[in-house]
Image: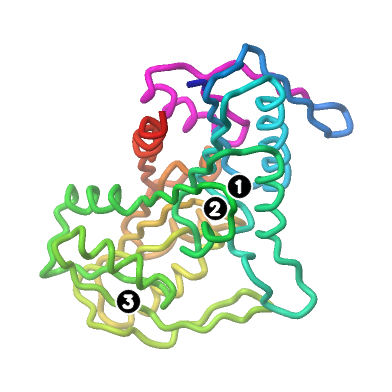
Amino acid sequence: MKVFSGSSNKPLAEKIAEKLKTKLSPLEIHIFPDGEKRVRILEKVVDNECVVVQSTSTPTDQNYMELFFIVDAIRRSGAKSATAVIPYLGYQRQDHIFREGEAVSLEVVIRTLEAVGMDKLILFDLHSIKIPELFHIPVCHLSALPLFAEKIKEERFTNNSTVLISPDMGGIRRIKMLSEMLSGMPYASIVKNRNLATGETTAEEIEGEVKKRALIVDDMISSGSTIITAVNLLLQKGVSEIYVFATHPVFSNAAPQVLQKSAIKKVFVTDSIEVPEKKQFPKLEVLSIAKMIADELKKKR
């Protein structure tokens, strides 16, 4: 098995390769003065199973194009198969038309992913569980919930003083699954409204009982507004300790500063997206999904 990495998340790709007891295969990515890229595979891949690791986070379009080029280069070089590991799938929130006249960006991305010749995809904690159904190629949808459950046990957060919180009704399935992994830890959900034009959210109420400690669980943190809205409502309800568990650290705009200044004790995320040094902050702890991905790749061999 040959493992290649795009430029978006090389540290994760290196960890995956290490778990597979191999090294990253050499790849040349040349950027021309006008910004165009040329990709070249630097070792023979004929009749080999090839894996490409590339998160399509910011800059989303550039990272997608790079992924397409790498897979195309592998295919043209005679690879037996091409599996794309996309820990964070860009455009996943644009999976349907919100307002008349919009494109369904995710469907455009899916058609292109299929067209370049991928055989399989490994994706992580998608915004909607229905997304894999849109593909015509095999998709393995992994989740960071087992990692979070392990961390919660390690932190000794007990069921009698802790409640799992979904920051919106859409995350109910996620916290129910996590609750089952934690011997039935109680859970509650926040009912909110979102302005489709501005993206701003307002919390209305909490469905379920809260306790001294709340663990907010979400698929991603973008601007941080959803999390902060939830935090403010929980504080009003008398919660004294708040922790956040989110798979994808998108961290757009001033999210790191907002989270650091908030009443949150700690923010746990995964390395599905590489967090640059300028976006790291003291309350942040990154958990690695490398072993989960490597274990899945071993099954495919």
Q: Toward which corner of the image does residue 103 lie, by quadrant? A: bottom right
Of badges 1 and 2, the one in the foreground is 1
Is residue 158 positioned above or below 18 on the image? below
Q: Are marks 1 and 2 in contact (CB under 8 Å)?
A: yes
> Which residue is more in the foreground, 13 or 159?
13
- Name the side, left or right, on which 209 lies relative to 268: left
Residue 142: percent from left, percent from top: 40, 49
Residue count near mark 2 (Cα–Cα under 10 Å), binned few <14, some 14–19, many ≥20: many
- Which residue position holds label 3? 235
Which comes sooner in the sequence, label 1 or label 3?
A: 1
Residue 154: percent from left, percent from top: 18, 47
Does dot 3 land on a helix, a strand or a loop?
A: helix
Kindly identify which numbered label has been placed on residue 250: 2
From this viewpoint, which residue is outermost toward the right?
34
At label 1, the amino acid type is Ser
Question: What whole-number distance in Å separates the C-alpha atoms at marks 1 and 3?
Answer: 32 Å
- Which residue position holds label 1? 57
At label 3, the amino acid type is Leu
Magenta stretch contains residue 21: yes
Of badges 1 and 3, the one in the foreground is 1
Does dot 2 land on a helix, a strand or a loop?
A: loop
Residue count near mark 3 (Cα–Cα under 10 Å), binned few <14, some 14–19, many ≥20: some
Q: Residue at x 67, y 27 (%)?
A: 75
> Which residue is more in the foreground, 164 or 202?
164
Does dot 1 land on a helix, a strand or a loop?
A: loop
Is residue 93 positioned above or below 39 on the image? below
- Tell me where the magenta segment starts and ends, as one range: 3-30
Say which quadrant the C terminus sits in: top left
- Name the side, left or right, on which 65 lies relative to 123: right
